[in-house]
Amino acid sequence: MPAVALPVLGAEDVLAGLRALRTRQPVKFSAFYSSQLGGIVTDPALMVIPFDDHMVHRGHGIFDTAGLVNGRIYDLEAHLDRFLGSAERSRLKLFGSREQMRDIIIKTAAASQLRDGAIRYWLSSGPGSLELSPAAGAQPGFFVMIFGGLSYPERWYTGGLRVMTTTYPIKPPLYAITKATNYLPNVLMQMEAKEAGFDNGVFIDEDGFVGESSNMNVAFVTRDGVFRHPKFERVLPGCTSLRLLELARGLIGTAITGVEVSDVAVADARAAREMLLLGSSVKVAPIVQWDREPIADGKPGPVASALLNLLEEDMRAGDRLIDVPY
Ligand SMILES: Cc1ncc(COP(=O)(O)O)c(C=O)c1O
């Protein structure tokens, strides 16, 4: 192997290097707030965090993602509730109050000029050492990214998805309900599923109950028409799931017969009339095949589309929207 030239770089070289990186691999990041920089940047090359931040080298950080829909932020309070819960369980100091963080999120969205996409924000325990415990005197870091959001193939909605049971173990309860930056099991599950030709994976717990997918919850419609969701003990309490469990009550007597949150045994789940993926990015998508076996007749069912309509209406004109002051 030929020797590699290793220059010692100055500030301008670093900036040129960061810009070259973004040219090689363009990203759709519209605005980024960093408490460490003390403001907002819109040039993706400047959306950086120090290597010694505890979130980077030890995964001691949390995050959350809310949707930006038609110039409005959807259900931010639910996402902030979960963010604060994750911070407490991770023993992270907050950066300012909930109100200050909400204000920064809204102002960063305004600076982005983006009207449809996603807002992801992080709390880190800050830089200052490479130790296992946070550095002495470390200041918590707060970061907000406004970006194009995750998108999925149209065929997921029209034809449905195919999933597999992952071979990776589910997270223990504390880590499952905390939205920390430790997504290794989720990443490995999704990679495994894609490599095997599936759209995604599903975690099953040690007692044979259904967990969740990589970055989405799963739910079912039972043979007798109940919209059934696993308990929020081994899975992340999805803001979409929690909202849909409320909205679905409006379908009782028509599309469904009831709503239930309970442990879902794999055998019952496989016999479901419908299987669904739920999440802020995917919204509601039907799963039509699991471990190569069809769910019911292997076609998307009516409850998936009824729930998707309810959610889209709530995102368009419900009472959980915040106008972005562009
Ligand atoms: C592991 C995991 N489960 C479920 C969800 C769905 O949560 P939400 O509906 O809040 O997007 C997410 C996404 O944040 C997730 O990362």
Image (cartoon, rainbow, N blue to C red):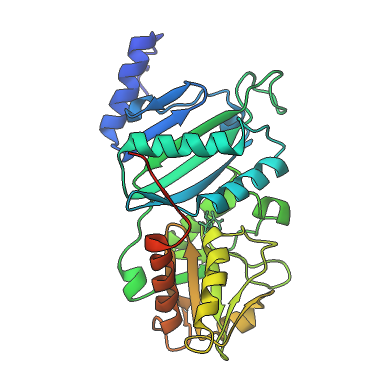
Residue nearest the observer in this picture, 197 or 234: 234
Residue 205 in view here: yes
Query: Image point 39% across, 83% down: which residue?
Result: 299
Q: Please provide percent x and percent y for residue 285.
A: 42, 70
Residue nearest the observer in this picture, 195 or 155: 155
Against 25, residue 296 (above or below) is below
Q: Please provide percent x and percent y for residue 165.
A: 56, 69
**In which quadrant is the C terminus drawn?**
top left
Number of marks in the rendered image: 0
Q: Please provide percent x and percent y for residue 91.
A: 72, 37
Against 238, residue 104 (above or below) is above
Against 7, residue 69 (above or below) is below
Residue nearest the observer in this picture, 102 or 182: 102
Q: Residue furthest bottom?
A: 224
Left or right, 219 with respect to 285, comes to: right
**In which quadrant is the N terminus drawn?**
top left
Residue nearest the observer in this picture, 1 or 66: 66
Residue 161 in view here: no
Quadrant of the rendered image containing residue 222: bottom right
Query: Image point 30% across, 31% down: which residue?
Result: 22
Query: Image point 34% across, 46% down: which residue?
Result: 148
Left or right, 255 with respect to 92, comes to: left
Query: Image point 64% across, 29% down: which residue?
Result: 125
